[in-house]
Image (cartoon, coloured by chain):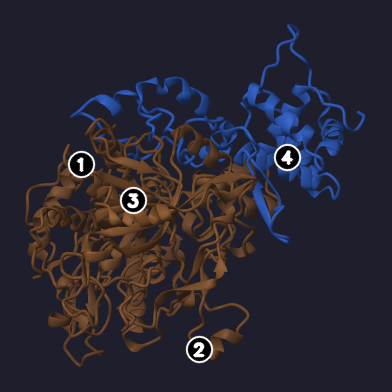
Chain colours: A blue, B brown
Amino acid sequence: MTDGLLPPLNDFIAVSVCLTGVVSLDADLAEEYLERVHRHPQLGPSLGALVARYQEFVGRPERPADGSQSADRAQPAEIEEAAGAQLMADPELGPLASQLIYLWYAGAFFEADLEVPGRSAWDYGANPEHYGRGLMWSVIRAHAPMTPWPDTPDASRVTPDAANLEPYWTQEPDVTAPVTVPPRWFAVESDASSDGHARREVP
Amino acid sequence: MSSREDSQTTRVPEYDVIVVGSGLSGSLVADRLADSRTRVLVLEAGGTVVDRRDLIARFATSSSKIRHAPYAGLVAPQPYYTELRPDTSPFSARPDSFGRDYYLEQPHTEDDSRAPQSPRSHLFQSYYLNIAGGTTWHWQGLWLRMLPNDFRLRTAYQRGHDWPITYDDLADWYTEAERELGVSGDDAAFRHLYGSHVGPAYPMPPLQPSYLDRLFMERLDGATFVDDGAHDGGGTVRTPVQVTPVPQAKNSRPFAGRPACDGRSSCIPLCPIDAKYEARVHLERAQAKRVEVRTHSVVHHLTPLSDARGWRVRYRPWRWSAGRAERDSPDQVATARVVVLAANGIETPKLLLLSGLAAADGQVGRNLMDHPVTIAWAQAQQPVYPFRGPPTTSSIESLRDGPFRAFRGAFRTAIRNDGWAMANGAPNGWAPGPPDQASTLLDLVGGRKLFGRGLVSALFERTRRQILIGSAFEMLPDPTNCVSVDRAQLDDLGLPRPRIQFQVRDDPYTRATYEAAIRFHAQIFDAMGATERRLGAVGVPDAGSCHIMGTTMMGRDPGTSVVDSHCRLHGHPSLFVLGSSVFPTGTSANPTATVAALALRAVPTIRAELRGQRVPTS
């Protein structure tokens, strides 16, 4: 694969599954992240090589016959383990592998702070959605601060007396549910904000 | 003086009341004063929030996620101003700067001035928001009434000062404020807390304790804290400690047209759904009653009109231009019979000093206080599942009063629901930490090179037992801790910046306070079966509380205080000063409940002043 070309989405998802350890990655989000990595001036040029190196270990994933892009692409665990370890240890590609994990877990790259020499900082990018969709929050059975708890019923906002008698934070979370990408939140809330709560304005 | 000002000063004042600052005090007062007969103008230094969604988006895309992150492009010059300029992207957390882009630091001693960096005990780590609605945008919303003995510290414990008012003078105003703002609280837990909260029940039931809190409640059931009496030669004192839901100005059920909290876990820096009280609620109400509000208007000089007819208020309009605040037009002037100065504990004394309204004995700006915080964090014995729910839902209020206050400070201890976030930016992390304490994403990926399923289980295991507690303690008033102005160091609007001399003292009283809090944290960790403990250090405050108190102290004696018992500047009874700057002592209570009560209490006095019936000092 030539440096600088956008790798196929499926290939990007496959290496992402290997590095994150999460089999059900959201394909739409993967497309946005692929674009984000590709556009990144330092990381983008190595992306093709990372995908290629991964495929050297595991072989090219077979595409579904119908051409769809199923997001589930788990390899046998030992092969994934070996491939991931190689990528993380690779002096050239290891930093990109780490950044790919950061992106999926936090929605951000962790890189040199443009304003404070010698420091690194999180770069969440321009899309507010990404911050709330980090895998981290699903792994630790929480949610990104300022985003809704995924199962919050709308009724909790409007039912006068039954509201919040036993809100989610009083309960032990379900630790058996599979780890998933948290749902979209920013656009969803913008759409729902016609009730006036989220858009209250100070004139 | 321009001819325009000349003519204005010779006329009847344009307004009955000018309120400087639209934070909690200013907005409450403006709302209460607003009626068809009273002409009220609010002058706000900062800009205004147009759409909450913009704040949420700014937070989500900000690098640091610290408490001022959502407010870029909206604030007048203030601490962290450079990070709040809209072209600054991504914003950075700068944990060692503490607002030095605005505050000028004044060393206490020659030793300090030689040191390349002040010790942490000498940094003023608290700040505010110069924005319509003030710092209530990013306050945590905790609502603690002061205790009766907080008002009589000198009489009861021979420390600090007595206030010129008592708990009873404020009790009804606390109740009134609780109705006005909307407070959720556990009546039973607070009704008997050292005699506080003797009025009606809180308007709403408490925000429910978290799963994590309940484990603390179980493990600390029946616990006592022991003061061994070594400091005062007295006997051992055992104080029973109790974990209680903390009262909060957040809706536990829909209230006043705002929704109930649904647990976004981001009270600081912003409630995205408007369940937490913000002063903009009362600012909007005031505006609906035709109170005039001028934002982007930095007041920088007050002059008494001749014959005590009122005040001339000079302010500087500004706008954003090329990523910074820029003067928008020549200074403007407005006049009023009464001025309410409610610009917070830094800007209020600064304005009095710039206006030459500080008495010769120099009390204005002195006695700057905060609630320094010492934190402790550890891994609990059993999973607590943090990062869910409001940052604090329960606290320990048991050590806020007692005979120990003769030899050490009171403190209140918060149980945090957000894991080690305060300590290391968990769960993602601020920077890679030491390998033996690896717990964040940065530690485990950047440091240990974990990936895949190993990473999933390490993150889960290293996060789900995280506990963090923090005690915020009372510091005594100290006249050498002070705010002054430096007329040679100007902000972007050409106005002088505040110079701050501040120190959490290294004296027996303060050391005993730290020691007690740290010992208490260790005792709590014992009860929780906690491992990997990190306790704070004596003399090293981990954080400030953004509780800026004491710089225009209330008192009977004009020689030792700045305002009288009705919050009027000594010698200028038509100039009211509101906010926590009037507190004579810091106590251990978060200040906002008392700020609100004092503001509501001032309204009848202001009205009487407008009627020409001056209320005598008590």
**Viewer-side residue, B495 vs B596:** B495
Q: Residue furthest bottom?
A: B233
Badge 1 crowding class, 10 Å Cα cut-off, few under 14, some 14 to 19, many 20 or more, is: many
* Residue position for label 1: B34
Q: Secondary structure at mark 4?
A: helix
Query: Closer to the observer: label 3 or label 2?
Result: 3
- The Cα atoms of the two marked residues, 4 and 1, are separated by 69 Å
Query: Closer to the observer: label 4 or label 2?
Result: 2
State which tag comes first along the sequence, 2 or 1: 1
Residue B583 is labelled as: none
Residue A81 is labelled as: 4
**Percent of width and height locating residue B302:** 35, 62
Query: Closer to the observer: label 4 or label 1?
Result: 1
Chain where mark 3 sits: B
- The Cα atoms of the two marked residues, 1 and 3, are separated by 16 Å
Q: Quick check: marks 4 and 1 in contact, CB under 8 Å?
A: no
Amino acid carrying mark 4 in the image: Glu
**Viewer-side residue, B371 vs B38:** B38
Q: Secondary structure at mark 3?
A: loop
**Percent of width and height locating residue B170:** 12, 60
> Can residue B218 be seen?
no
* Residue position for label 3: B23
In the rendered image, the quadrant that contains the C terminus of chain A is top left
- The Cα atoms of the two marked residues, 2 and 1, are separated by 49 Å
**Residue at 69% across / 59% down in the picture?**
A116
* Residue position for label 2: B109
Amino acid carrying mark 3 in the image: Gly
**Percent of width and height locating residue B436:** 61, 64
